[in-house]
Image (cartoon, rainbow, N blue to C red):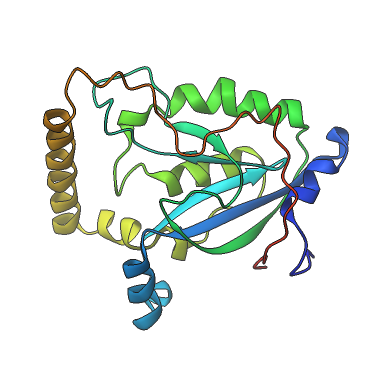
Amino acid sequence: MASATESSSDASESSDKSGCEVYLHVYDLSENTKWLADEFSLKDYNCGAFHTGVEVYGMEYVFQYYANEPDNNELSGVSAQIPRTDSAYVYRTTIDMGWTNYSNDEVHRIIYEEMRPQWIHNTYHITKRNCVHFSSALCRRLGVKDVPDWVFGAAKTADATRGISALADAAWRAAKYWNSYYYNDDDDGESTGRNEVDPETTTVTFPYHVQQ
């Protein structure tokens, strides 16, 4: 069991042959959604709204939609970042997902040769194919535990309810249409990742709480 003060990035120091620990970082979408989730115990009813990223070998991998590239069918939504540094969200907790037996090189191939081509940014959907779905797919591919139901939260609940699912579809189509209108052709789209870093040259050495 990992201690409360153990840095998940310590796993990156393990031998490639022995694998490493995998962590799920969970974020609230904003201070407002965090307050709502805490005040009304939305987590207990699987009604929260969360962003997630999977940390393996000291890097955190996320999936997102790039609003300035709505028609780019080749741009992957998968990017790497230093764990817990995404300032667009409010960090909530870290969950120990278990041990992967894959080496660092094998994980790199899984993410960059398998996952990135499969997870194109504009296939993102707020309830059907979001960052939590990506985290779930990556965790299963790494052979560790799946994402808990409470993390899927309101997205899974909405998708299982016909009326709400239809409303979510309409809202997402409207949002994408607005993005297409808002971002003009002068935007070169070069800025496509929040805090994206090169996993080959970055090391992480800070501790944080791990939820068992």
In the displayed structure image, the side of residue 37 where residue 160 appears, left or right: left
Q: Report whether residue 191 is seen.
A: yes
Q: Nearer the viewer, residue 163 or 14?
A: 14
x, y percent for residue 90: 45, 61
Q: Which image quadrant: the N terminus?
A: bottom right
In which quadrant of the rendered view does residue 61 lie? top right
Q: Report whether residue 145 is seen.
A: no
On screen, 75 above or below 149? above
Q: Residue at x 72, y 60 (%)?
A: 207
Q: Residue at x 59, y 53 (%)?
A: 24
Q: Nearer the viewer, residue 118 or 184?
A: 184
x, y percent for residue 37: 37, 74
In which quadrant of the rendered view does residue 210 lie? bottom right
Q: Residue at x 24, y 27 (%)?
A: 70
x, y percent for residue 40: 34, 81
In the displayed structure image, the side of residue 172 where residue 202 appears, left or right: right
